[in-house]
Image (spheres, coloured by chain):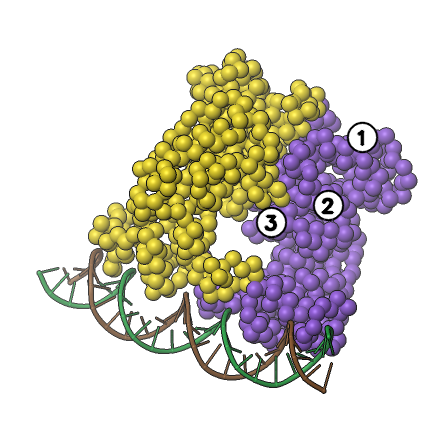
Chain colours: A purple, B yellow, C brown, D green
Amino acid sequence: MTRTGRPGTGSNQESVRRHNLGTLLRHVHRVGQTSRADLTGLMGLNRSTIAGLVGELESMRVIEHVTPSSTRSPARQGAGRPSAGVRLAADGPYVIAVDLGVDRATVARVGLGGRVLERASAPVESRPEAWQVGASVAALIRAVVAGAPTTSPLVGIGVSVPGLVRRSDGLIRLAPNLEWVDVSFGSIVLAALGVEIPVSLANDADLGALAEHHRGAGVGVDDLVYVAGNVGVGAGVVVGGVRLTGSGGYAGEIGHLPLNPEGAMCHCGNAGCWETEVGGTAVAAAIRCPADRVPQLDEELAALSAPTPELRRIGRHLGNGLAAIVNAFNPRLVVLGGYFSGLFTLVGGEVQAALSTRALPAPLESVTLSHPALGADSSLLGAAEIAFEPLLADPESALGASLLDVGSRLAG
Amino acid sequence: MTRTGRPGTGSNQESVRRHNLGTLLRHVHRVGQTSRADLTGLMGLNRSTIAGLVGELESMRVIEHVTPSSTRSPARQGAGRPSAGVRLAADGPYVIAVDLGVDRATVARVGLGGRVLERASAPVESRPEAWQVGASVAALIRAVVAGAPTTSPLVGIGVSVPGLVRRSDGLIRLAPNLEWVDVSFGSIVLAALGVEIPVSLANDADLGALAEHHRGAGVGVDDLVYVAGNVGVGAGVVVGGVRLTGSGGYAGEIGHLPLNPEGAMCHCGNAGCWETEVGGTAVAAAIRCPADRVPQLDEELAALSAPTPELRRIGRHLGNGLAAIVNAFNPRLVVLGGYFSGLFTLVGGEVQAALSTRALPAPLESVTLSHPALGADSSLLGAAEIAFEPLLADPESALGASLLDVGSRLAG
DNA sequence: GTCTTTCGTTTGTCCGAACAACAATTCACC
DNA sequence: GGTGAATTGTTGTTCGGACAAACGAAAGAC
């Protein structure tokens, strides 16, 4: 590591190699399996160059060769020699994805391509101490890692947080439902594990947006917003294919849009925030759901067959807020996650109508509302994506910093 | 042009050269004058590599050599041989920047470094025909170009539009104050000029944000929002140093945030848009300004010595809307352009107070409100920036596509 | 069964950045 | 004022990596 990480903005020949290696791996990571011929077309490089890059990644045990005969896909086009297949290695690098929910923590071992190889979860009591959650997550990580091949390197840990995460260092500034303020959850987990690996933390809605963009409802869509109704309301934004973080990392906090000066008081101290109209409390009141079932609001909504008038009103409010989002970000897709998905199936008409009347025609004409394609796993898979990011940016150095034989290391 | 513009995402050696050449020119474009030693530090390349790049740009007559003796700046640090200076060539490439205002059109010849070399403007009557404005702008362009050296190449035209501009092709979808719908203003101007050069169009607030980011109040700030109060209200957003366009190009249209369901009717057909509370009409009513002076609202506000109670109320509304912006985009800087600047000097306290109570603490703590540093030229200079963009991305091919001896070509 | 098409492989070439050595120029110190 | 240290420009060489061409391999088309 003598010369890596140079801060300069110029590109030298090492950076070219790094970039090409990473781009190639990123493509395979995205589609799972390709052919070398496809890669030459996608990357615009020479056949021989692709051969070199594939060979290098193969020697790193990240991808593996597939004999052309078994690659023969039904969509095989013209004549000619079939191209050699390239796919992700079976025992390749993996990451640990952690999804801190309001009532339970989910941990998964995720391989390249977003394959969930193993998963485990545990309930989280209300108003938990950070170190308790850290210990619980560490135990889940140990369980999930136990079955991993010793030759598979662990690249990093990604954590989805229901709250505001500072971009610079991953500090959890505020997690309302956990009642955490300024918690350095990454170091807590690492201390509990007793190892040193890269940990990336980010907001759950941001990660939901990222996951839906990569392998969900937003594949091929470079500008989308993922609006999640959980206990609170938050949004994640993907712009030009990259996550919108903002200066501090708090972008997309649209739960407290001041949509109604005469509205109810919000816990933030102001009146008429969007969250007071479409948040968990409001929806629970509209369907007479007991307070302790608010974390499972999606199930409660799914059990309903027909919307109540109060729900219809909430649907209109949801559409109003979405109009603000559509005007501000001009996405091509808005994914409604959390219990908003159930709400959308019930009162989709009201949501669409309110959105159509309040949004500007120009941004409106290209936007689509949709359910998440990854269900409740959006944030988890997004956490995996940010953990993989260093590997995709520079495979060689990320593998150098990765951890081998994780099972025994964590046990000891 | 046999191999350029390859769609692939891999980098080859040509792209390295292109990128380095562009990055070097971009640096010089930003700071105006540097030394080769600074460039080696900034770009992280070898001295000899920088020498080669500088030499190539010098042979293109884009930058020029400065003898070290005259470079000797007072802030000269340690010992050693002084580094050779590099500055933009005096008769280098330039662009035409056009700022379509609500009541007048401004055209400038702008050189690298954002230097306004020549400018002219003409009034625009109310509800003008597009071809009339196009002819007027073409005449201004001819005037502005007349004095240009015949050896200076014209790289492109940038146009700032007070309305919604489609990103894909620059079509003006809607310009409310001009009452234009679906106007292809770029082709109109080109037809009036009788030449074929690249024309880039974008929203005025977006370009204001870009200009303030490059050479205004937001230098060094990668996440900022430029909120402009003109007749309407719009915002331009810079995220991570790049313009936020959104899917269609309409991002940042926050004038119709539904902030007050019981508010006044807006011309968009809905009630309580932000624009009804802080827009030109509302402010004009608050200071008893006649309707025909609304385009000059900034002057009217500047003439005021003390705010009226109605203005204070508008200030609070402005702060409320800014809170939504701060929560949504998490910028580090919010530049208040148009008449918002004058409003901010009068009722800055109210604006800040409302912002502080309604924005979340985390994004709030790092945000600053400020006046524009470029005055009324923000959008004009932003238009110049987008016109220069192809040159900075690839100097060689952009110069190849540029136009020489413009004065006589346009006269003919 | 042969031709065409497409792809993988190999070899050599070329381009551009890095490197090393040397000359140039200034400052600091005596 | 002279000398050494420090920094930079210049030049020639090296090296890494993409590219081009030639060749063989594997399929489909006739």
Q: Earlier in the sequence, mark 1 or mark 2?
A: 1
Q: Is residue A170 left or right of residue A265?
A: left
Residue on which the image places disc 3: A240
* Closest to the observer, B151 or A303: B151
Q: Position of residue B21 (x, y in %)?
A: 41, 57
Q: Amino acid at mark 3?
A: Gly
Residue on which the image places disc 1: A313
Q: Position of residue A263 (x, y in %)?
A: 73, 26
Image depth: mark 2 or mark 3 in front: 3
Q: Residue at x 39, y 45 (%)?
A: B154
Q: Is residue B229 left or right of residue A68?
A: left
Q: Secondary structure at mark 1?
A: helix
Q: Earlier in the sequence, mark 2 or mark 3?
A: 3
**What is the C-alpha distance between the residues marked 2 and 3?**
16 Å
Quarter of the picture containing the C terminus of chain B is: top left
Determine if residue A8 is in view. Answer: no
**Number of other residues with Cα within 10 Å of mark 1, as a class: few under 14, some 14 to 19, many 20 or more:** some
**What is the C-alpha distance between the residues marked 1 and 2?**
20 Å
Q: Amino acid at mark 2?
A: Val
Q: Secondary structure at mark 2?
A: strand
Residue on which the image places disc 2: A335
